[in-house]
Image (cartoon, helix red, strand yellow):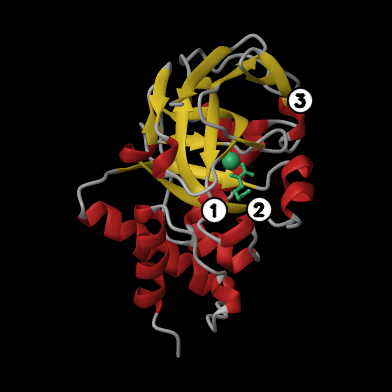
């Protein structure tokens, strides 16, 4: 039987030291999806034991663009801690990452708890605010390659995220233009429609999926709804900005 705590230590150390590791599935750890979520929970528990605080949930593979880029087609979720947050307008040091990529997303701030199977309307009625966001994903696996249990165990590649100004959620989220720019040049262009026809559906999916793990979305939690476009490789010295139509923008820079 696989010792899940040992696997959790492997992925946690890789993230902590920004050191690439071989895929678990290629090193004798053939995890089921359920075991992979248990590893994720154990590895994030190591972070909370070091003083980090859980502040939300991220969804993955909620758009075709992301599924096609990574070759996987099942929605997944990961855990966000306060230490992963990058200030809007902030500067990050790429030395802390293995091979980071960025993707434009829409973030939700919860007003009320949300759990179990909910409709789009029920999910949206639990929201305090929405914001443009950028996720920095950084798979700890060599060459950014993994199968579904690998990526789930690695906290779904979650590494950092930046959130722009929160605005009222009373806007139609179903078709907002989204642009990701590097040094002012568009590198990805898409629409919020790419995320399940409405990113609110990713929030509903988050509610359903986390309840399978006995959790619920809590007031004050931040929920990342998933990349609307393929991710772009982050390079030293660039300025990254994501703009969402009617919502605003969020940006940060990578130190040269
Ligand atoms: C897995 C995480 C996927 C998204 O927004 O779809 C994700 C990965 O692509 O490495 O964060
Ligand atoms: Mg993402």
Q: Along the horizontal axis of the image, is 18 left or right of 234?
A: left
Residue 9 x %, y %: 35, 68
- Residue identified by numbered label 3: 190
The answer to which of marks 1 and 2 sits earlier in the sequence is 2
Residue 69 x %, y %: 75, 47
Front-most of 232 and 195? 232
Q: Examine the rendering and report whether any part of residue 116 can be seen.
A: no
Task: Check the image and report above or below for 61 versus 12.
Answer: above
Q: Examine the rendering and report whether any part of residue 229 can be seen.
A: yes
Give the label, 1 or 2, closer to the camera.
Answer: 1
- Residue identified by numbered label 1: 139
Few, some or many residues within 10 Å of mark 2 (<14, 14–19, 20+) = some
CB-based contact (under 8 Å), mark 3 and mark 1: no
Q: CA distance from mark 1 to mark 2?
A: 16 Å
Disc 2 CB within 8 Å of nearest ligand 1 atom: no
Front-most of 132 and 20? 20
- Residue drawn at point x = 36 percent, y = 76 percent: 6
CB-based contact (under 8 Å), mark 1 and mark 2: no
- Residue identified by numbered label 2: 75
Displayed quadrant of residue 150: bottom right
Residue 168 x %, y %: 51, 13
In terms of secondary structure, where does tag 1 sit? Answer: loop
Give the label, 3 or 1, closer to the camera.
Answer: 1
Q: Residue furthest front?
A: 256
């Amino acid at each position: 039987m696989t010792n899940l705590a040992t696997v959790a230590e492997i992925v946690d150390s890789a993230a902590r030291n920004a050191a690439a590791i071989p895929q678990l599935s290629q090193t004798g750890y053939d995890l089921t999806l359920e075991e992979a979520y248990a590893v994720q929970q154990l590895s994030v528990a190591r972070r909370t034991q070091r003083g980090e605080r859980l502040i939300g949930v991220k969804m993955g593979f909620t758009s075709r663009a992301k599924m096609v880029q990574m070759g996987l087609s099942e929605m997944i979720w990961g855990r966000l801690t306060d230490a992963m947050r990058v200030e809007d307008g902030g500067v990050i040091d790429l030395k802390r990452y293995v091979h980071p990529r960025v993707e434009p997303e829409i973030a939700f701030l919860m007003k009320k708890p949300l759990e179990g199977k909910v409709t789009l309307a029920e999910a949206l009625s639990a929201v305090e605010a929405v914001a443009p966001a950028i996720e920095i994903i950084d798979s700890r696996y060599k060459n950014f390659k993994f199968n579904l249990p690998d990526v789930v165990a690695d906290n779904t590649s979650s590494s950092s995220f930046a959130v722009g100004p929160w605005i009222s959620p009373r806007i139609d989220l179903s078709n907002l233009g989204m642009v990701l720019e590097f040094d002012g040049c568009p590198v990805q262009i898409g629409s919020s429609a790419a995320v399940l026809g409405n990113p609110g559906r990713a929030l509903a999916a988050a509610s359903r999926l986390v309840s399978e793990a006995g959790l619920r979305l809590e007031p004050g939690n931040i929920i990342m709804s998933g990349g609307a476009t393929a991710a772009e490789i982050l390079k030293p010295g660039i300025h990254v900005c994501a703009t969402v139509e009617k919502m605003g923008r969020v940006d940060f820079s990578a130190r040269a």
